[in-house]
Amino acid sequence: MPCDNHRRLEIPVQPVPKQDPRERIKNWDEAFLGYTLETAIIEAERCIHCPTAPCQDACPTGNDIPGAFLHLEQGDVFAAVSVFRETSNLPDMCGRLCPQESLCEGACVVGFAIRPAPYGKQPPVSIGKLEAFIADYQRRNGGVPVPETAPPTGRKVAIVGSGPAGLAVAEELTKQGHTCVVFESWPVPGGILLYGIPNFKMRKEILQDKLEYLERMGIQFVCNTVIGRDVTVDQLFEEGYQAVFVGTGAPVGGQMRIEGEELGNIYQATEFLVRGNLEPDQLPENMREPLDIESKRVLVVGGGDTSMDCVRTAIRLRAASVTCMYRRTEAEQKGREEERKHAREEGVEFMYLTVPTKFGGEDGRVTAAECLRMQLGAPDDSGRRRPEPIPGSEFSLPVDVVVLAIGYEPDELLEKTTPGLRTTAWKTVRVDEDYQTTRPGVFAGGDTVNGADLVVTAMADGRRAAEAIHHYLENLG
């Protein structure tokens, strides 16, 4: 085990260079420019290789982070990425999209260590940025090799949804020799990874490389197909599939259910993001009209990472002003602090302890948000203090465009069209400990089971569900 932890604790954090905010608002490139090999090795040397590895315990996939970094500090990037790929199907994506500050980095002992003067307190090891660097290095230097797969089993699995859970299931089951077909309702595969993640957080080429890798493995993608409408689960079994995995996520945007919500230029977050970030041929015909945002006053309602994606998209579409409105304070926000910092750097204004109560408009388009100031009361079931209205604090905010980023929930279509499939009161699909639903042969995981959550938790679900499906297929007569 590596020693000399005193020396390691004296190594200063290696900052990752970023685009200047004044420049990055003019493009859609990632904000972070990434490590060089030299700085990545130095940052990896900050890891003190704790015997208990709390960072590994905090990772939903159980990545052997110290093991990967030991290879990296020795200059063997390919060995490092092999360690990550033992437990993760999407290290380059998780390295960019995970809230590391509340997962692996939040548990990193280096961030808590007491150092003698003049070193003082230091941040945790930059685990996410190193994970992304390691995976990127492999992609840029030969790509990800297609693994050997088991002999064909003759078993066929339908995977509904091509987001992180579905992609993980397809990859893991294909390694076991099963035939996998992934059905996607959008025109292009990728699910939330394509339609919910802007370029300035993750370049589209990263997802495209992953999809091409999966196709080389033999996985087939069928797009523009809604399971439950175009094809039912029953029909999939009739067509010869022995198992079905449901990974449709939580695609239905939350509604405020207030007066004026139906006015023009009021968008759900997903529609706003896809129309602002994607090419027309990647979208359904009803979403191909460009957004008219330039020189407009944009209001985004919501405080999570999706709202940060929306405000930063609006900035790049040259809005005159962009305001993020949240009913609690920043201390209660669930999204990443890093994303809020980027938004502020780029010119976004934050309006806390405020909620819209009504939208007004002219000629069918929104022109104002009637708002109410809030104060924090007693904690609710989530442990966060409940926002309560302040009587007499009403005011009107002029707006031209409103984006609602107030949460997501699963679609009810599959439950309604699949006999025996049961859901919870929150519309999530019921599963047992083996990810099997109440309908035999149908499995589910990710946001469709957990509600709107993280890319990494959906991928972790997919890996575990794939193992359960493999055992199920082995036991079929």
Image (cartoon, grey):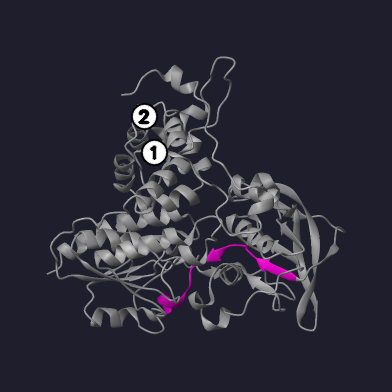
**Pick the front one: 457 or 5:** 5
Q: Which residue is mark 1?
A: 57
Residue 453's spot in the image, x, y percent? 49, 56
Q: Amino acid at mark 1?
A: Asp
Q: At x 67% / y 67%, what residue is drawn?
A: 403
User: Residue 97, can we see it?
Assistant: yes
Q: At x 41% / y 26%, what residue is drawn?
A: 48
The quadrant holding residue 447 is: bottom left
Q: Amino acid at mark 2?
A: Thr
Q: At x 67% / y 49%, what residue is drawn?
A: 21
**Image height check: is 126 above or below 180?**
above
* Residue found at the very far right of the displayed protein: 392
Q: Earlier in the sequence, mark 1 or mark 2?
A: 2
Q: Which residue is mark 2?
A: 52
Q: At x 63% / y 54%, what residue is drawn?
A: 24
Counting the numbered discs, the total is: 2
Kindly check if marks 1 and 2 are in contact, taking CB atoms under 8 A apart as contact: yes
